[in-house]
Image: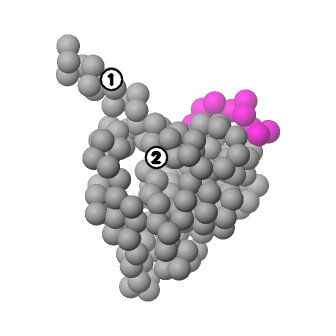
Amino acid sequence: MKFCGTVFKYGNDVNTDVIFPGRYLKVWEPAEMAKYAMEDIDKEFAKKVKKGDIIVAGKYFGCGSSREQAATCLKAAGVSVVIAESFARIFYRNAINLGLPIMVCPEIGQIAEAGHQLEVEPTTGEVKNLTTGKTAKAKVLPPFILEILGDGGLIPHLQKKMKKAS
C-alpha cells in the first residue's frame, strides 16, 4: 500500500467544523458529503481534489467535534492519506475506523507545500517529496491498523474476521 498524490496543505488546528461544516450534517451520502469537504477553509478543495491526493497539515488536525463525517467526506472526496504533525485523538480513531489512512509526521510541514507531489509508504513511514526530493519519516502504522485500513475500515475488517471464524 503506497500513496502518491498532489498535496493540499493546511495549518494548525484544522477542526472538524471546517473539514465538514455543520450546516451539511443532514447530508448522509458519502459522495454528496464530498462536495462540501473543506469548504470553510478552502472553497476550491472539492472541485480540485482528485483521487489519490494527499492532505498535509500542522498540529491537531481534526480537533473540535467528534463528527465522523469529517473523515467520511475526505475519504469520499478521494483523499488517499492525511499526514499531519499531530491529530486530535477522536479524529484519528474515526479515520482509521472509516478506512482513511492518517499518519503522524512532525516534519511534514518542512518538506511539503501545496501542489507538490508526495509518495508515502505507510509500512516504513517514508515520505518523499517527488517535486523537491526532500524526505521525512512518519510514524509507522502498526500492523493491526494497516490490516483495518487494507480491509476498508473497522466494519469490513470485523465482517471479514467473523466470516473467517464461521
- The amino acid type of the residue labelled 1 equals Gln
Q: Amino acid at mark 2?
A: Leu
Residue 27's place in the image compared with 128, above or below, is: above
Q: Is residue 153 above or below residue 61?
A: above
Q: Examine the rendering and report whether any part of residue 76 can be seen.
A: no
Q: Could you tell me which residue is drawn at 56 percent across and 54 percent down?
A: 87
Write the residue at 79% across / 39% down: 23
* Secondary element at image label 2: loop
Q: Quarter of the image holding residue 29?
A: top right
State which tag comes first along the sequence, 1 or 2: 2
Magenta segment, which residues?
22-32
Q: Which mark is residue 100?
A: 2
Q: Position of residue 70 (x, y in %)?
A: 62, 44
Q: Quadrant of the C terminus?
A: top left
In the drawing, does residue 132 fall left or right of residue 65? left
10 Å neighbourhood of mark 1: few (<14), some, or many (≥20)? few
Tell me which residue sits at (60%, 37%) in the image: 68
Left of 137 or right of it: where is 28? Answer: right
Q: Residue at x 50, y 57 (%)?
A: 82
Which labelled disc corresponds to residue 159?
Answer: 1
